[in-house]
Image (cartoon, rainbow, N blue to C red):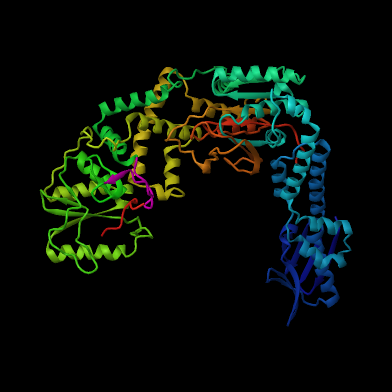
Amino acid sequence: MSFEGWSGKGWRIVVTDAEVMVVQHQRSVSIGRADAFGLVVRRRLLGWSLQDDGRRVVRLRGMRKAQASALARVLRRLVVLPEVAAAEAWQASVVGLVAWGRAAQRWIPSESVDALLSMRPNRQLVDRVDAVASELSLTDDQLEAARFVGTDVVALVASTNETIMAAELASGRSFFDTIEKRPLTDEQARAVVCFDNRVQVVAAAGSGKTSVMVARAAYAVRRDFVAPERILMLAFNKAAAAELQERVVARFAAVGLDWTGLRASTFHSFGLDILGRATGEKPRVASWIDQGGDVRMVLRIVDELRDRSESFGRRWDLYRLLFASAPTDLDTHEPDGYDRATRETGYRTFAGEVVKSHGERMIANYLYLNGVNYVYERPYVFNVADATHSQYRPDFYYPEIDVWHEHWALDRDGNPPAAFVSYLQGIQWKRTVHTQHGTTLVESRWADVVFGDGLQTLQNELSSLGLRFDWNPDRPINDDWAKPMKHEDLARLVRTFMSHVKSNSWTREALDRRLGTELAHRSGYRTQLFLGLYWEIHDEWNRRLAAEGSVDFEDMLVRAAEHLEAGSIDCDYDMIMARRQPRPGPTRPWSGEGAGSVSARGGRRLAVDQPVRRRGSLGDHRLRVLVRPRTTARVDDHVSVHADNLRCRQQLRGEEPESVQQADASSVPRPGSARADHPKR
């Protein structure tokens, strides 16, 4: 190890290849190379000093200008030269990866790019190098490496992949024309060649997703990327798996490829096989899981809990009848009724009337289910119309106790929607009217009704004024259009939520933490009402599984994933492709454009979009297939690619309902007038 030293009155500095040693008054300080960026030699009134980010480390008594220049040069070299060497190595890795892709005509996966980006030297290196290049005598190659650090590697690899794509499409045209009975379109062929380590296909029914899956498997075998026995295809049921296996055999034979060992299976079978191999005891999936039996089991559990607990029954009905259909956004605008008298749209109530907001409907329905007699928007007992106000009509009037009730469209912060001009002034005017005329006014807020215990607070206040409440969830509904959520639909929603909870291994504590942080805007009475119901059903569900020694679909996948993650069993597959049957329905929380759904329009088209990040995975691409729809339903499909036990675990743990997943994993070089609440007149 080389070193240089300087000394003076009461101090000594030694610079090696790895550190700067400062000795002063028999005490020494070691500054490593990684921390030496801020070290500079400065001249002040009292002479030279060594400073670290503006703070004096030692006063260099007796140092001359030539010595100070030499020390400064050595300090710069200590920092810059190792960085230049790192830049040269990083440049070689990037250039090597691109050269490998072009030579092998193999798509460069995003994981390789992410690995390079994580190792990229500091981009400010080029500025430091430019400042000291002459005195350090850097070569042209070193200067080029320093400047290469600023290269847009993502764009470079994307351009390279497009070159590879064009070459593969041209050289493999015969293969793409014969791998299926009908030639693959250019878009389908591009989806096959896009061989990233996780690829998501988003497609509508009949768009050729299965053709892409079969062709990708054949492409992997044809190019010697993956051996057939290391490829697994997963389907949603036995019939689909058998059909997929038959199709693979037929299409591989059509192009003269060996399919021996390539397996098509179901998610159930794959997960159970892993558990059996890992534990020595293959579990059994509960008999009531498939064919809608899971929802029927939730209903059975709910019936028993309702029989055992009056509290559970009331909370179940309260959520089903009132909160399930209530929006959580004050600006939501989804009127479902029409008042012929006022010629205004609004919201139908159980009593058969049309009110002007979601919040008013919740209150009206709550009053109806409690047998409370009220009048909606009855003209105020005194004529208060003036030049700026029409005759006042409070939201509710309770004739039995002569009390008026206003429901304010105010959020948690006490603010109305932005479009409600002068709304707060209107509230004050109405309060003043009641004060001046000596009439009794009770008030409620939208935020309190939806997120707080506003309904119970209203009941308590009205009860104290003499109004009687008699809760009866079975009261006949007077409006054929005002249908509450059915027991079956709420059970289905609970089962869907259970699937997410179990698949993500969420606990009560974990959900509570999320509701206290990123989901704080959803926290409140409504949420806690649902969670309270859910966890009672969840516990009883698990008790029944344990009693019969079986597992459900989610537990099976999670446990299998845990064994793979722990390394207690080998995955046995380098390429996993998975497809699951869509289950259309209004309660799917993942539906919508944000979840990658596609609303099919026009002719057939498939495109490879920008890389996507889902569930923390790397190297994802989204493939989008669009065809003319047979119905207006949306279909979500996914394709993912995994290479080792970790990727198998991610496949199991990260599986989304209604999906198609595909995986690659060979080795690569590692480097109207109505609103949620309305403005009152």
In the rendered image, residue 132, in percent from the top left (x then y), is placed at: 82, 66
Relative to 110, does residue 10 appear above or below in the rendering? below
Q: Residue at x 81, y 40 (%)?
A: 102
Quadrant (top left/top right/bottom left/bottom right) for the C terminus: bottom left
Tell me, yes or no, whether the highlighted magenta stretch contains residue 329: yes
For the stretch drawn in magenta, what is the main secondary structure?
Answer: loop
The answer to which quarter of the image holds residue 240 is: top right
Q: Indicate whether residue 69 is drawn in magenta.
A: no
Answer whether residue 14 is visible to the viewer in this image.
no
Q: In the figure, is residue 396 to the left or right of 199?
A: left
Q: Which residues are magenta?
A: 325-339
Which residue is drawn at the image coordinates 73% and 31% (left, top)?
A: 666
Q: Say which of 440 and 123 sits in front.
A: 440
Q: In the image, is 211 to the left or to the right of 90? A: left
User: To which quarter of the image does residue 19 belong?
Assistant: bottom right
Whether residue 656 is visible to the viewer of this picture, yes or no, is yes
Give x and y (percent) for residue 374.
16, 47
The vertical placement of 425 against 672, above or below, is: below
Residue 78, placed above or below residue 234: below
Q: Residue at x 51, y 18 (%)?
A: 283
Q: Residue at x 58, y 41 (%)?
A: 614
How far across and down, in percent of the image, does residue 126 sit?
78, 61
Callout count:
0
Position of the N terminus, as image quadrant, is bottom right
Q: Out of 476 and 154, give the one closest to the viewer.
A: 476
- What percent of the width, then of the height, locates residue 623? 63, 38
Residue farthest to the bottom? 45
